[in-house]
Image: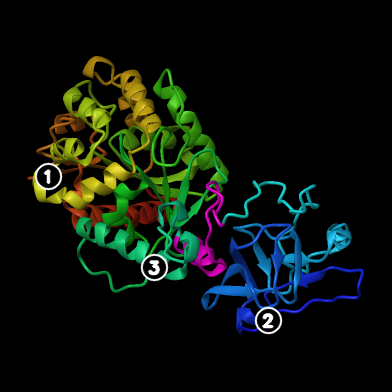
Amino acid sequence: MTTPTGTEDGRMATVITVGAAAGAYMDTVVVLEWRVAPGDAVRAGQVVAVVETAKAATEVEAPRDGVLSAILAEVGAEIAIASPLGLIGDDADATLATAIQPAEGATPTAPATPDGTARRADAPRSTSGEAWTDRIIASPAARRHAETVGLDLQAVVGTGPGGRIKVRDVTAALRGRDEVLSELAPDPLPEFVPAAVTEAAHPLAVTRSGPDTGTPILLLHGFAGDVTAWHAIERRLARTHPVVRLDLPCHGRSPRQRFRSFRDFIRPVLDTVDALKAGPMHVVGHSLGGAVALTLAERRPNLVRSLALLSPVGLGTEIDNHVLEGLCRAARPESLTPWLRRLVVDPACISDAYARAAMVAREDPDLRASQRALAASLFPDGTQSINVTPLLRRVTMPIRLVWGRADELVPWRHALAAPGRVALHLLPAVGHLPHLEVPDTVTQIIRDMIVCAGSGNRMADRGGVP
């Protein structure tokens, strides 16, 4: 191992750096471990620290005999190659520790503490080799890769030294996620679809995918779901259109709140859609998301070009309260699976992998508690308190109602409340999740709706009647 060197004039401490030990093409390293503490005597060539470089774990040796007088880069810190790791010098030299400035690109360090250890202002001091428990340690390349594909590093297990996340770990996590999701939509999709990118600059969590140009499609999931519920059709739609998905309040990564009424519940959605500034959109809503979509169309008609409502609530009073309670109570895959399978006709649509993935998203007890409170507000005593039927008569854009004839949660006969101009698609042998059970059919209905909305706009422009 190449021994790093420092500058020494009898009065200045010798600087410990990574130097050539980092290897080619490396700009930064992460400190994994210190094997000595301030005040310890060290010998030239002795391993004093371990960092992660392109060659994985790399040992850093002392450049000379002396006493370690200061640590300038804590465990977990990511620093530039030329930045100082620590200082070797006698007691007089240690007073000069604060005069040593990190090289450009280094992680800033705080002045030395009385015991000679320079501490980051936002982290505890550690010389034992233990990484901070509140900080995800990942290589810069792994962070960039995870950000590009929209993967949360909290869900990635690091296999590098000290549990650091490497690019290979992000790739493995993506492969595992894709294996689970492939059971939900096993058909091959040869066309390239840009990876979903998650945003956090809105009242609710927003996920985008598909091309950057074109009229967006907004997808609003149902009660107890999240944006992943759209996976089977999102990939299809994203081939040709920008796709925007929201986690509704109390769902997914959106805030957990208490709502006294549906009117309160809809406000964060309106705020989020306003903040998107995406222009007119084709909106698809499922179940609770269907009622939200219809309300959005009535409140923001200039932002909604067409509506597809899949098994929406709010058009009648009946709802299977036992299923709602079962979904809210379930705290394990074994208890969640039977209730999910009540939502479909073919139980094979809800594989064990699907149920496990759904339960991972519902592990947070605060999320489940907030959804129990939401169900009590929106569906008190097993009755739908939401009534959006009048809105069907007020909105003017093209509307498609899609319902499974075997829906046991919300009866398909509620669709009969719609006026005659609303197109109704009744799907045989389909339950409450048509976008999961028959994704090709639902995708085609949405595409036909988009074409119809476009034709209607052109006819209106010519003074005709759509």
- Point out the stretch of residues depicted in magenta: 129-149
Numbered-mark total: 3
Q: Which one is nearer the viewer's eye here, 183 or 16?
A: 16
Quadrant of the frame with the N terminus: bottom right
Residue that carries the numbered disc 1 in the rendered image: 430
Q: Which one is nearer the viewer's eye here, 255 or 268?
A: 255
What separation in Å lies between label 2 and label 3 (alpha carbons)?
Answer: 34 Å
Q: Secondary structure at mark 3?
A: helix
Q: Residue furthest top?
A: 381
- Picture layout, residue 411 above or below residue 191: above
Q: Secondary structure at mark 1?
A: loop
In primary-sequence order, the first of circles 3 and 1 is: 3
Mark 2 burial class by Cα count in 10 Å: few <14, some 14-19, many 20+: many
**Residue drawn at 38 percent across, 42 percent down:** 397
Tell me the kind of residue under disc 1: Val
Tell me the kind of residue under disc 3: Thr
For marks 2 and 1, give the one nearer the viewer: 2
Whole-percent x and y of residue 105? 73, 67
Mark 3 burial class by Cα count in 10 Å: few <14, some 14-19, many 20+: some
Residue 227 in view, yes or no: yes
Mark 1 burial class by Cα count in 10 Å: few <14, some 14-19, many 20+: many
What separation in Å lies between label 3 and label 1 (alpha carbons)?
Answer: 35 Å
CB under 8 Å between callouts 3 and 1?
A: no
Give the numbered dot on residue 171.
Answer: 3
